[in-house]
Amino acid sequence: MGTTITKRAARFSAIGAATTAALLLAGCASGTGGDSGSGDAETFDLTWTSYTTPEGYYSMAMDEWISIVEEETDGRVNIEPFYMGSLCATLDGLACAKDGRADIAYTSPAFHPAEFPLANVVTVPFVAKDPVAQTATQQELYNTNADYAAEFDKQGVHALYFAPVTTSILGAKQEISSYEGLEGLSVRGTARMLKALEIGGANPSAIAVSEIYESIENGVINAWSSTGLESAVTEWNLGEVTKYMIDTQSGSFINVMAVINKDVWDTLPADIQKIMNDASAKVWGGLSGEYLDAIFDATCDKVDQQGVKLSTWSDAEAQKWADAVGDTLVNDWRAEAKSAGASDEQIDAFYADYLQKLEVASADSDYVPPVEYCLNRG
C-alpha cells in the first residue's frame, strides 16, 4: 500500500454495472478502524490479486467494484487488479493478502480448509441448493457468528464480500439422464465433489478448470463437473467439446470471497471503509430481477451458439445421488474442522446456525438455476 495515486495504464472493460452486479453476491461488513472523515485526503494505492480471467464474471464484478470505489473516493483510492494469478498464484492469494504482497485477494475456503475449517462448510454439496442464499448466509455468519468471524481475524484478513458459484453442472459428450450414468465415467471434479463422484461410481480426476477443454480433446477425461454453467460456456467455451450439460441438482459446492489485509483495512479512514461497504452493497443489490436475467440471457445465448443441449435430472434421480452420499461429506467436513482445532460443541453449534440462516435466506431468495432459466426461456 502506498500514499501516492498512480493511475492504471489500462482497465479491462466491464460489461456494465447491471450485468456485472448479477454475478456477484456481496455483503456489508462493518469496520472500526480508520479516521471518522476524509481528514487530510491521504491517498491509498492498493493491489488486488485474482486467479480469474479478465473475461470471467468475478473479474467483471471486481472491476465494477473497483470503479465505484475509485469514483466515490475522488481519487483517494487506486486499486490495481492482477488477473490469472499474474501477481500471486491461485493457492497463494490468502498468503499474499496476509504478508502484504497484495492488499486484496480473491480466494476460497476450499483452497484453505485448515485456515477456514468452519467457513469450509460451503464445500459440502447437497446441502445448499441455492448459491445466492448460501452466500447471503456466509455474510450473515460473518456479521453475527463470533467463531466464524474469528477465522478471518486469525488469518489477518477482513472479508469485503462473498461471491457465489452457481450450482455444479455435469458436462459430457453424451446425454447422462440418470444417477446410474455416472458409473465408470472419467470426470473432472474439485473439492468434495470428487468424493461425491466417486461414491456415484465415476472415476474422478482433480484437473484445473483451465485444463478441462484440452483434457476432453485429448481423451484424458470424457466429462467434467464442479463448474457453473456461466463459467463453462462464457469463460471456458466447454460447449465446443461437450455438447451435453446437465444440472444434477447437487447444489452449491464452492464459492469465492474477497479479503483485504486486516492492517490495511484498519488503516483506511472510516469514510473509505463505508464507501467500500457501500460498493459491495450496490453490486449485491443487483443480484435479482433484470440484472440476473441479463447475465443468464447472455449465458443462454452462448449455450445456443455452442450447440449445447441442456437438461435437469428429475428429483428422483437427484435424490438417488444425495442418498448415496448421505452424511459422508458433512462428516468429512466435521472431521476436518475438528482436526483444525474446533471442538465438537463449536462445530455442532456452528452447523446448526448455518442451517438455520440458510433456511431463512433460501426462503427469501428467488434464484432460478441457470439451466432451468435457459430451458424455460424457450
Image (cartoon, rainbow, N blue to C red):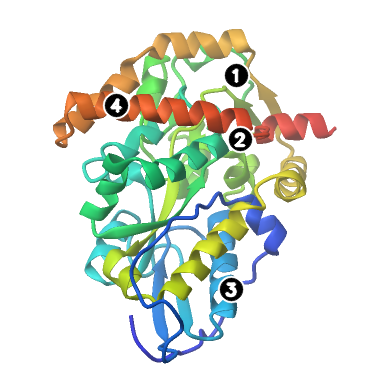
The residue labelled by disc 1 is 176
Helix, strand or loop at mark 2:
loop
Q: Which mark is first along the chain, 3 or 4?
A: 3
The answer to whether one can see residue 169 in this image is no
Q: Which mark is first along the chain, 4 or 2?
A: 2
Q: In this rendering, is residue 140 above or below 170? A: below
The residue labelled by disc 3 is 67
Helix, strand or loop at mark 3:
helix
Query: How far is mark 2 from mark 4, CA to CA?
Result: 42 Å
Q: In this rendering, is residue 341 above or below 14? A: above
Task: Please give the label number shown on residue 242.
Answer: 2
Say which residue appears at 39% left-offset and 21% top-offset: 196
Q: Quadrant of the C terminus?
A: top right
Helix, strand or loop at mark 4:
helix
Q: Quadrant of residue 293?
A: top right
Query: How far is mark 1 from mark 2, CA to CA?
Result: 12 Å
Task: Please give the label number shown on residue 349.
Answer: 4
Discs 2/3, front: 3
On the image, the x and y values in percent for residue 329 come to: 33, 22
Neighbours of disc 2 within 10 Å: few (<14), some (14-19), many (20+): many
